[in-house]
């Protein structure tokens, strides 16, 4: 999900954009609190997440073990795609610890990857359209309730996909925070990669880029470019 307004950022919080295109554009914004001890309970974390206005904010509870806590403005998430890719890029770790299990992480050139089991991702309805033009012609979410991920092949032989994602409510409006369309959705890309069983290069939203690849033991890797938007200024000694 995305909220393109740039809020005032408190000290100690990194703001990143995850799943950018090759020029560093697009992608989803993400807040990362490097020291979660300053927000010791769910109430304080929810308050900060709502104040920042991003769809997800990550609280790092143990930077050495990679223990992290993901929040949206309305709830705590056991797993999410773009927050984990962004946090893996920021911390440079090989493992992130989550309630659902350990998520692997790695760097490969300009791409940061995470590896996770498809069943950890929240449910998504994946609907294939007949053409890229049909996907791009949507002016809003199709009628219905629940998360919808529409996609079409741009080039099936090359594994290139055009996709858009809508966190629908039954009335056709967006999810909490007024988000009608998700710019870059790692969890949905993971599910699509698992369903198709092959590497994918997904162009989502206005131009975000998400890669997927099969991994051992039934896992799927999701990768992309991460760019910093705001880095905290180090405190003077």
Image (tube, rainbow, N blue to C red):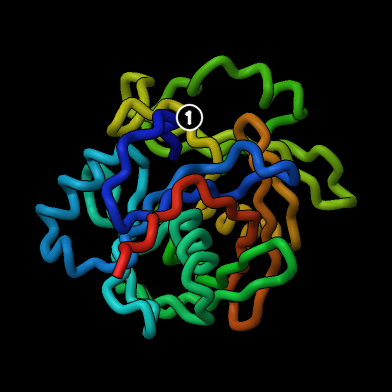
Q: Which residue corresponds to mark 1?
A: 181
- Spot the residue most to the right: 157
**Quarter of the figure with residue 27:** top right
In the image, is residue 117 above or below residue 10? below
Q: Which quadrant, please, contains the C terminus?
A: bottom left
Which percent across, then down, holds residue 146?
A: 38, 36
Would you say 182 lies left or right of 146 here? right
| Secondary element at image label 1 | loop
Circle 1 packing at 10 Å, graded few (<14), some (14-19), many (20+), is many
Q: Which of 60 and 75 is in front in this view?
A: 60
Q: Which quadrant, please, contains the N terminus?
A: top left
**Quarter of the figure with residue 66:** bottom left
- Residue found at x 37% / y 31%: 145
Which percent across, then down, holds residue 227?
A: 58, 51
In the image, is residue 4 above or below residue 21? above
Would you say 128 lies left or right of 66 here? right
Q: How many marks?
A: 1
**Quarter of the figure with residue 134:** top right
In the image, is residue 174 above or below residue 112? above
- Residue found at x 50% / y 45%: 229
Q: Which of 46 and 136 is in front in this view?
A: 46
Which percent across, then down, holds residue 13?
A: 34, 55
Which percent across, then down, holds residue 173?
A: 36, 21
- Residue found at x 67% / y 26%: 135
Q: Nearer the viewer, residue 1 or 164?
A: 1
């Amino acid at each position: 999900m995305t909220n393109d307004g740039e809020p005032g950022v408190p000290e100690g919080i990194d703001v990143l954009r995850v799943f950018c295109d090759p020029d560093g554009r697009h992608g989803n914004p993400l807040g990362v609190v490097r020291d979660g001890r300053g927000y010791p309970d769910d109430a304080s974390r929810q308050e900060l997440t709502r104040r920042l206005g991003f769809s997800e904010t990550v609280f790092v509870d143990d930077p050495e073990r990679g223990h992290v806590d993901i929040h949206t403005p309305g709830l705590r998430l056991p797993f999410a795609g773009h927050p984990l890719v962004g946090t893996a890029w920021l911390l440079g770790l090989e493992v992130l610890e989550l309630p659902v299990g350990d998520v692997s992480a790695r760097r490969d050139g300009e791409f940061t990857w995470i590896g996770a089991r498809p069943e950890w991702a929240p449910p998504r309805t994946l609907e294939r359209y007949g053409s890229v033009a049909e996907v791009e012609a949507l002016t809003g979410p199709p009628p219905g309730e629940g998360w919808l991920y529409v996609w079409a092949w741009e080039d099936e032989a090359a594994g290139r996909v055009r996709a858009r994602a809508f966190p629908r409510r039954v009335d056709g409006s967006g999810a909490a925070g007024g988000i009608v369309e998700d710019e870059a959705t790692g969890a949905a890309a993971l599910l699509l990669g698992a369903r198709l069983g092959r590497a994918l290069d997904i162009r989502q939203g206005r131009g975000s880029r998400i890669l997927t690849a099969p991994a051992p033991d039934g896992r799927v890797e999701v990768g992309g470019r991460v760019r910093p938007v705001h880095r905290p200024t180090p405190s003077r000694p």
